[in-house]
Image (cartoon, rainbow, N blue to C red):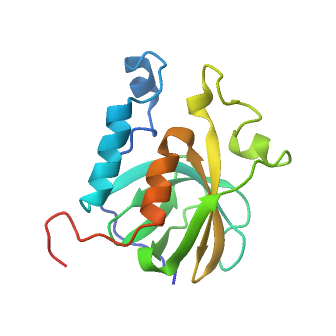
Amino acid sequence: MASRVEKRVRFRRSAGTATPIDILRRGFRPPSKSALAADLSAIDRGEGRTLACLFRGLSGDFPRRFGRKMRDLAPDALVIRPFWSSPLRAKFRIPREAITSAHLRPPSLGESGKVMDDGIYPAGAIFAWAAFVVIICESADGKFELGVPRPDVPLVLHYLNSRAAAPADGKQ
């Protein structure tokens, strides 16, 4: 069941979620393969990561329109919280075991402008890594969609389709 969240635990940003300073430091290049692999390893160890995302619900109590959000891949739950500039301040916590499946949504011409997908940043183009890809998730509370930065797609699918890991300190 999705629930409201009060206290936030801070996690390290994923490699695909970059600030303008990060992009300048990388010289406008995509994140390195080693940084992306480190994120996957961290999730396997039970650590969390924070990512930028777009979020909307297709059913349940979730908002129906795509909105800018931050997403925490916590060891026990997916936490959706507002982006710093978002006027909508709702936060959601979806337990990891409540997410039954996650898969890529086929590209949709009507949605491409809303999620910055292949219509704006086609594969093979110089800034293809800057695109967002939509992942459809099914949970006990209904379906929802996550617009995910392209470099973070393997990380998010790995997180959503794997079982909840033990916390990093080994305590349950």
Where 48 falls versus 151 (above or below)? below
Q: In this rendering, would 119 be left or right of 48?
A: right
Using the rendered view, name the quadrant where residue 123 is placed.
top right
In which quadrant will I find the C terminus?
bottom left
Q: In this rendering, would 19 be left or right of 111?
A: left
Task: Give the residue at x 29% y 43%.
Answer: 38
Q: In this rendering, would 154 be left or right of 146?
A: left
Report x, y in % for residue 21. Answer: 40, 24
Where 170 falls versus 15 (above or below)? below
The reply to whether residue 90 is in sight is yes
Report x, y in % for residue 74. Answer: 35, 64
Q: Nearer the viewer, residue 147 or 38?
A: 38
Report x, y in % for residue 53. Answer: 55, 50
Where 35 falls versus 28 (above or below)? below
Q: In this rendering, would 65 be left or right of 68?
A: right
Where 123 falls versus 99 (above or below)? above
Using the rendered view, name the quadrant where residue 114 is placed.
top right
Task: Give the residue at x 58% y 32%.
Answer: 130
Task: Give the residue at x 47% y 66%.
Answer: 161
The reply to whether residue 62 is in sight is no
Report x, y in % for residue 131. Answer: 62, 36
Q: Nearer the viewer, residue 103 or 139?
A: 103
